[in-house]
Image (spheres, helix red, strand yellow):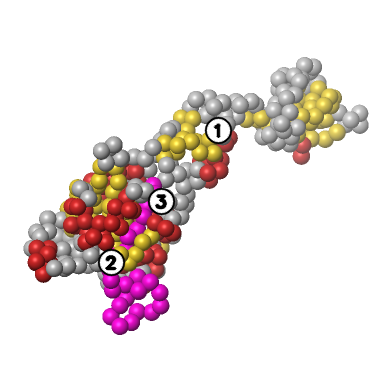
Amino acid sequence: MSTETASAAEQVAVPPPAGWEEARSRVYAVGLAAALPAVGRPLADTDGHTLAEPLTTRTDLPAFPTSSVDGWAVRGDGPWRVVGRVLAGGSPAPLTDDGTTVEIATGAMVPEGVTAILRVEESTRTAEGRVAGTPRPSPEWREPGEEARAGEELLPAGTPVDPAVIGLAASCGHDTLRVRRSPRAALLVFGDELLTSGPPAAGRVRDALGPAVPAWLRRYGCQVRPADVVGPVADTLPAHVAALRAALATADLVCTTGGTMHGPVDHLHPTLEALGADYVVNTVAVRPGFPMLLARLVDPDGRVRFVAGLPGNPQSAIVALVSLVAPLLAGLQGRPMPVLPHATLAEAVPGRGDYTHLALVRLDRVAGTAHPVRHVGSAMLRGLAGADGFAVIRPGSTGEPGARVPVVPLPLLPGERSCP
């Protein structure tokens, strides 16, 4: 970069940072407005996706009366003469005569005319081979529509698909589901000072974000191919513009690491300007991670893509992921805005003045408490490796022991559910 360009960069006025909660709401709204299209997928391929339309039943559940137990389906008073057997998967003939019974298996269709089911373990046989016993007063079968009626909405659009949802959809008779297409993401790593192998040495540091960020993105439901991770990109404006333009050709979201400020080799802002991007958020009043950003590009055909600028310090980059990328991806996938769980602080956590403080914590899910961890500097990852999320200490406050505070959880694998 020339001296003249560097001086101009240093003189760029940084806008007032957005409040942390405001920034989350803003990026979620633009993501939801650009929600990805719906596609049909076989049930086996829907885990980790999001329902694009409500899940409804194709029939009553159950569709016909089914036995809850192994036993005897009887008509009238006993002892009963055995006239047949009904197994699951069969369509039995009606039971027409009083004093008769058919052996019945759990899950089998209950014949018309049955007045009760006698459990096998509560039955006996007479000398004449008839079945005797006293059926329980409550029916021992499931009535049609007991779980749901045909056409009933079971889950709304925006529900994440997990194995339980897949099983429910199958029981309703669905072979495919309409789900949101998974976001395609790419990562550009900026910084001539970065090594991609071996230990740090001679003023150069190991790139920790190139291997880590794609894994975080996959946990948020993104597709990230090895070819979508590029870097280190040379610290020149032409190299940045070329790399970002290439990544945006196929990605819905491009994350970048480093270069989010206005230093002599920070080229992200002029790159975004060269590509015609507009800022959704440009810096956030949060520590660590203040110089994060999210920009949007809209093609003439209306296609919308996003660039998330993550700070170069590793922990700050993850703060940007949970602060901006997580709500953006929720919107793109048509999911509700993530609701933050709360926990009770077990120890004091300092505030950061007018900034929100996201403090790494380990959760005791049995006790419902959050414990601050050590080694939490912006450039450190040791604390992050032992943490479950970030406690939110709001501006102008401190986290006192015993205080209930929101917690931003670190993402799980697609389809996983977090513990309360």
Residue drawn at (76%, 29%), measured in percent from left and top? Answer: 86
Q: Amino acid at mark 1?
A: His
For mark 2, does the 10 Å Cα neighbourhood hold few (<14), some (14 to 19), or many (20 or more) residues?
some
- Where is residue 272 shown, x and y percent of the image? 21, 53
Residue found at the far top of this picture? 96
Crowd rating for badge 1 (residues with CA inside 10 Å; few <14, some 14–19, many 20+)? some
Residue ID for mark 3: 222
Q: Which mark is residue 234?
A: 2
Whether residue 226 is visible, yes or no, is yes
Mark 2 or mark 3: whose residue is earlier in sequence: 3
Q: Is residue 269 above or below residue 180?
A: below
Judging from the image, what secondary structure is the residue with disc 1 in? loop
| Crowd class of label 3 (few under 14; some 14 to 19; many from 20; radius 10 Å) | many
Image x and y of residue 156, in percent: 42, 35
Please give the range of residues in magenta.
183-207
Marks 1 and 3 sit apart, C-alpha to C-alpha, by 25 Å
- Residue 66: x %, y % from top left: 66, 30
- Please identify the quadrant where the N terminus is shown: bottom left
Secondary element type, mark 2: loop
